């Protein structure tokens, strides 16, 4: 299966109707259903852009009847303004202390960043963060991972940004938060475009399904199968829109 970083992007690159996309190939689900996936390249989406206009510009030229759309949560966050900038977050005593005990992970900066940790404190409250940090500390020697995020809850694991190694300077100064009411956003986008939509927060470790539009034809398990190798990719590929094509 592999991850996007190990793929030859130039071999995958395609262009049709003025749109650049990457053919991620076919996958087979646990139920035997097969899916083609096309990662559509966009411009760098800025704060306040219209998500339906993005679909019409980039997805419509490639769309075929029966196709489904995975819309990246981070781009949706930019569209609806679910973001925080550094000047809106003021790290306090606990954020400046606790970040030093966090570990850098393979997919980003984790909580090894006082601004991001302060944002979490602002979102869920200091008592919950202290409890999460304590439980994470006592379970980590036993190889138990993700305790901090599970205890904090409220979408904390979906925060992305304040990341000094980001390919984009803007993300060094801004954090994106998974948008509220994801199902409502998917329903609205479906009404405007007629394309069934699922909102995904995906990376090479996990694919978090935040919501899907009414009448989306795949089950949650089938969505996970179709997105099993993270066709969205990482880094500076600019491919937040994934056209999923069920094969007969």
Image (cartoon, helix red, strand yellow):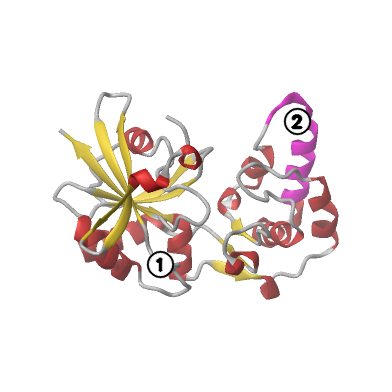
Q: In the displayed structure, would residue 212 be above or below residue 36?
A: below
Q: Residue at x 50, y 44 (%)?
A: 203
Residue at left offset 61%, top offset 58%: 166
Q: Nearer the viewer, mark 2 or mark 1?
A: 1
Rendered image quadrant of residue 191: bottom left
Q: In which image quadrant can residue 189 be found?
A: bottom left
The quarter of the picture where the C terminus appears is top left
Q: Is residue 160 left or right of residue 60?
A: right
As measured in the structure, the alpha-carbon distance from the residue carrying label 2 to the one carrying label 1 is: 42 Å
Residue beneath the point at 55% across and 60% down: 177
Q: In this view, does 30 lie above or below 88?
A: above
As for residue 134 lying within the magenta part, the answer is yes
Is 231 displayed left or right of 137 in the figure? left
- Is residue 122 located in the magenta-colored stretch of the structure? no
Viewer-proximal residue, 230 or 192? Answer: 230
Asked if residue 212 is positioned above or below residue 28 in the image, the reply reads below
Depth order, front residue of 205/152: 205
Residue 18 image position (x, y, % from top left)? 25, 64
Asked whether, in this view, residue 188 is left or right of residue 247, the answer is right
* Element on which disc 1 rests: loop
Residue 205 appears left or right of 72: right
Q: Which mark is residue 102?
A: none
Residue at image point 68% right, 60% down: 164
The magenta region covers: 128-144
Question: Quick one: quadrant of the N terminus?
Answer: top left
Q: Quadrant of residue 49?
A: bottom left
Disc 2: which residue: 139
Residue position for label 1 = 43
x and y percent of residue 20 in the render? 31, 58
Q: Give the answer, above or below, for where 59 lies relative to 200.
A: below
Considering the numbered disc 2 on the image, is that residue within a helix, a strand or a loop? helix
Q: How crowded is mark 2: few (under 14 residues within 10 Å), some or many (20 or more)?
A: some
């Amino acid at each position: 299966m592999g991850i996007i970083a190990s793929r030859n992007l130039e071999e995958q690159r395609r262009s049709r109707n003025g749109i650049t996309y990457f053919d991620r190939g076919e996958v087979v689900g646990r139920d035997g259903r097969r899916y083609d996936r096309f990662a559509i390249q966009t411009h760098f989406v800025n704060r306040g852009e219209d998500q339906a206009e993005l679909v019409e510009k980039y997805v419509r030229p490639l769309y075929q009847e029966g196709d489904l759309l995975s819309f990246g949560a981070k781009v949706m966050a930019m569209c609806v303004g679910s973001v925080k900038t550094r000047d809106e977050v003021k790290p306090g005593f606990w954020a400046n202390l606790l970040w030093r005990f966090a570990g850098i992970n393979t997919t980003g900066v984790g909580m090894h960043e006082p601004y991001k940790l302060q944002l979490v404190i602002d979102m869920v409250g200091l008592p919950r963060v202290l409890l999460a940090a304590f439980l994470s500390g006592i379970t980590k020697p036993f190889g138990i991972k993700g305790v901090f995020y599970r205890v904090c809850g409220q979408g904390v694991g979906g925060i992305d940004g304040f990341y000094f190694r980001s390919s984009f300077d803007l993300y060094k100064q801004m954090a994106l938060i998974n948008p509220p009411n994801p199902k409502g956003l998917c329903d609205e986008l479906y009404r405007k475009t007629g394309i069934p939509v699922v909102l995904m927060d995906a990376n090479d470790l996990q694919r978090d399904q935040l919501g899907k539009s009414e009448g989306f034809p795949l089950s949650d398990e089938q969505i996970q199968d179709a997105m099993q190798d993270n066709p969205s990719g990482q880094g500076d590929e600019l491919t937040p829109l994934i056209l999923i094509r069920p094969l007969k």
